[in-house]
Image: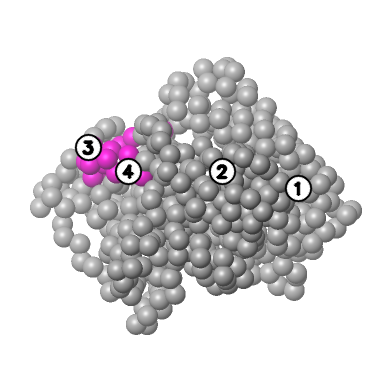
Amino acid sequence: MLKATLSLRGTLFHGPPRASFCRSNHIIYMKVLDGTTMEEAKIPPTSHIHRHNQASHHRMGPLFRQYFSYCSEGLWVGCKDLVREVSHAPHITPMCIYPVMWRLFEEKSGVKRGLSMNDLDAWHSNEAALKSLVINPTGLNHPMHPLISAQRLTDKWKSRNGSFTPHFDLEIWAIESSLTYLFGDSIDLFDTQLYHYCLKQMKKNIVALNLSFCPEEAALESSIWEGFKEAGVQALRMGREFSAATRESGGSGLVHQMRASGLWSEDDLNSLLADVLMNSSVNLMKTAMWIVHVMSSSTSIAEHLAKNSNDIGYIRLLLNETFRFFPVTPYLTKMNTEVLKLGGWEIPKGHLMIMSYFTLAQEEFFWQSDKYFWPERWDHCYDRDVNWRFSYSTLPIGFKINDCAFLKMTEEQLIPLVQVLASNLSLEQSNMTKYPDTKRAMDLSGLPSQPLVIQTNLRQANMRLHSML
């Protein structure tokens, strides 16, 4: 086998044929789907993002280097066999990407985020402490389940006539639900409309900044940068002030547990909660969109939920499969701490490697009938005494939900949403003209990019939901 070394300044790589991969014994065995179930489980995709990424890998080769956020670059691993090899390779460590714009935001605005990657020690400390409360609370009450926010959303849809767009409503619901989870029943004191506007401005401007390959100095002088900074400062300030205001009122949310734990000073706690609120709202909105898509795409899933809206076990299976099929974060980032031999290439240590969650989630090596949406597959993950935790450590987000505090928070809020929707609404996806997808080399939004039309039965009247997702 020939050997090639990837240079830091390369742009396109074509290596010799890779060595054969020896399959691990630690695989997940799944029961075979019958024909009826398989036909029913064909969930139509509403995004070209994943297919576009796969096409790029086919066109550019199994390994290629791409720049993002000005001077940063990553080694994209596009071939699923190579993704599998990286997942099993030794000396590989997870690597978080901290966008350049957020680093500059902290430096230029003077506002320090509670979950800042500029201070890794503080970040790991906060993340570990937060995980201990969210996943394994000891001697404390669980945070209030935000059923009230889900019921508000349903009541809002019931009161409307004709056609309307649920996208905006789901974004507001995500903010209200996150507030309820964190602060209990004090959400009426928070300006959700202003906060929603700030989040939308932040997202719009940071996408524009990340996609513009101009020098940092030029970007900082642009109106786009000013819009991003102003919205970010406002959102974080609102979160900190609201957290501080709940100190006297107490409450049953996560903030009460965090104060009772004594793990943070009041200032640090308020800064951390401002960041948690921002992250939770954005991720929750993304996953809620996919849940609505799934519930309206499969007749069997919709019927089961309608008859068993209190079946929490099934809803958890549904969420796991949704995270597999539609990853919250499209990419997995890791770094090799030693020289890595990958597909005939010798990669020097210290390379940022970017892999597709979608590639792993659609991998027949791990998943039987991997192209089919089948929540029940998660009921059979313990078959044949498989070391499933080892296997799941190589798979996409959602497979080890108890290892991620934010994902656990998302699950806790999606469960009541699914329950209330299933109890009150009958969702059926309708056909409509497909809009052309925007071609992008990298899209971190994780949102569907085609319109979704849903025929709903609210028991009182039929309505149509039009969602430009």
Q: Earlier in the sequence, mark 2 or mark 3?
A: 3
Magenta-colored stretch includes residue 423: no
| Residue occupying the far front of the picture | 461
Residue type indicated by callout 4: Arg
Local secondary structure at mark 1 = helix
Q: CA separation, marks 2 and 1?
A: 38 Å
Would residue 116 be found to the left or right of residue 319 on screen?
right
Q: Marks 1 and 4: in contact by CB < 8 Å? A: no
Rendered image: mark on residue 270: 1
Q: CA separation, marks 4 and 2?
A: 26 Å
Q: Earlier in the sequence, mark 2 or mark 1?
A: 1
Q: What residue span does the magenta drawing correspond to?
A: 50-68
Residue annotated with mark 3: 59
Residue annotated with mark 4: 51
Residue type indicated by callout 2: Leu
The location of residue 45, given as percent across then percent down, is: 39, 48
Local secondary structure at mark 3 = helix
Dot 1 crowding, Cα within 10 Å, few <14, some 14–19, many 20+: many
Q: Earlier in the sequence, mark 4 or mark 2?
A: 4
The location of residue 232, given as percent across then percent down, is: 66, 33
Dot 2 crowding, Cα within 10 Å, few <14, some 14–19, many 20+: many
Using the rendered view, name the quadrant where residue 413 is placed: bottom right
Q: Front-most of 264 and 172?
A: 172
Q: Earlier in the sequence, mark 3 or mark 1?
A: 3
Q: Earlier in the sequence, mark 4 or mark 1?
A: 4
Rendered image: mark on residue 465: 2
Q: Earlier in the sequence, mark 3 or mark 4?
A: 4
Residue at 18% x, 50% y is 344
Q: CA separation, marks 3 and 1?
A: 47 Å
